[in-house]
């Protein structure tokens, strides 16, 4: 379980996240929704310290990370937190000069000091999981956008993280390629991985979420089980936002 307490993130003196308090359940899929510029991606990036919170705390079970303007985490503490999470970006972020296989084993071999033979075996297993066994020796420029994102997912899984973070994983893809990636993420959800997903795709959010967080202007407006937030939202602003979207076509 990940617990965020009194989290603040400021840029140039302006609070982007404002006293955020939220819990991400273990073994569940949490979807973060909200208008553009609401702080969704900033919250996600704070969870693995791609952005350092200004104040507050993040706890992975009993391992608590405290933040303030006066204190700074050691490099080892930062790396320790990042090892707990795998990040899948909207822009893929693959190494262009490395093959698909090399991209996947880079983290386990370099960061975790895993035996290369074991890393290669795991990479083969993960490529099969994401439907790309025949692309192991291809380079990123030889792949479609959907294939690149599936490699990025395999790369994140190779690190065996406690939580997988997805930042708008399909926003750069056309609808057909988007479906390839969404199906892979849905498969991961059925395996009870802990996943936190920022998405603008409400159909996908309805289909995959166990837990939903609605954020606006840097504040948590509403958070709860999918059935409650999508079916019977308590807050007027949540109701207004969800009226903009039709009922899920995934269901």
Image: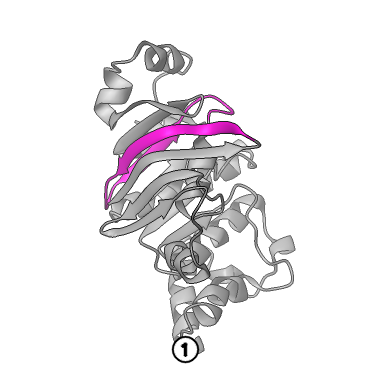
Q: Is residue 159 visible?
A: yes
What secondary structure is the stretch in magenta mostly built from? Answer: strand
Residue drawn at the location 70% of the way across and 69% of the way down: 139
Q: Relative to 13, is 163 on the left or the right?
A: left
Which residue reaches farthest front?
Answer: 70
Residue visible at 34% across and 50% down in the picture: 189
The residue lying toward the viewer, choosing from 207 and 193, is 193
In which image quadrant can residue 64 be found?
bottom left
In the picture of the structure, the residue carrying the numbered disc 1 is: 115
Residue at 38 percent of width and 56 percent of height: 65
Q: Residue 240: which quarter of the image?
A: top left
Image quadrant occupied by the C terminus: top left
Measured from the top left, where is residue 201 in percent x and y? 50, 31
Name the residue: 48% across, 61% down.
Answer: 73
Query: In front here: 157 or 12?
Result: 12
Asked if residue 180 is positioned above or below residue 10 in the image, the reply reads below
In magenta segment, residue 202: no
Between residues 134 and 139, which one lies in front from this camera angle?
139
- Look at the image and say whether residue 27 sits in the magenta stretch: yes
SS at badge 1: loop
How many numbered marks, from 0 up?
1
Picture layout, residue 209 above or below residue 239: below
- In the displayed structure image, the side of residue 92 where residue 58 appears, left or right: left
How far across and how far down the image is residue 70, in percent? 51, 51
Task: Evaluate whether residue 184 shows in this view.
Answer: no
Q: Position of residue 202 (x, y in %)?
A: 45, 28
Q: Residues within 10 Å of mark 1 (few under 14, many from 20)?
A: few
Residue 85 x/y as whole percent: 43, 59
State which region is magenta: 13-38
Name the image colouring: one colour
- Quadrant of res 24: top left
């Amino acid at each position: 379980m990940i617990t965020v307490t009194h989290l603040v993130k400021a840029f140039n003196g302006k609070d982007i996240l404002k006293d955020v308090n939220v819990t991400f359940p273990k073994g569940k899929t949490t979807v973060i929704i909200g208008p553009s510029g609401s702080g969704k991606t900033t919250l996600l990036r704070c969870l693995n310290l791609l952005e350092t919170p200004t104040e507050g705390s993040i706890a992975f079970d009993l391992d608590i990370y405290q933040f303030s303007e006066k204190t700074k985490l050691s490099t080892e503490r930062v790396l320790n937190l990042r090892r707990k999470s795998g990040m899948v970006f909207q822009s893929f972020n693959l190494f262009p000069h490395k093959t698909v296989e090399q991209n996947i084993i880079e983290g386990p071999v370099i960061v975790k000091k895993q035996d290369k033979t074991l890393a290669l075996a795991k990479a083969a297993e993960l490529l099969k999981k994401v439907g790309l066994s025949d692309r192991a020796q291809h380079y990123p420029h030889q792949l479609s956008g959907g294939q690149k994102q599936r490699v990025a997912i395999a790369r994140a899984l190779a690190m065996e993280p406690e939580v997988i973070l997805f930042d708008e994983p399909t926003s750069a893809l056309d609808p057909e390629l988007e479906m390839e990636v969404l199906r892979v993420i849905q498969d991961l959800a059925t395996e009870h991985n802990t996943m936190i997903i920022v998405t603008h795709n409400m159909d996908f959010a309805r289909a995959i979420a166990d837990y939903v967080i609605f954020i606006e202007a840097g504040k948590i407006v509403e958070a709860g089980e999918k059935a409650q937030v999508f079916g019977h939202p308590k807050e007027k602003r949540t109701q207004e936002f969800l009226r903009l979207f039709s009922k899920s076509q995934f269901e």
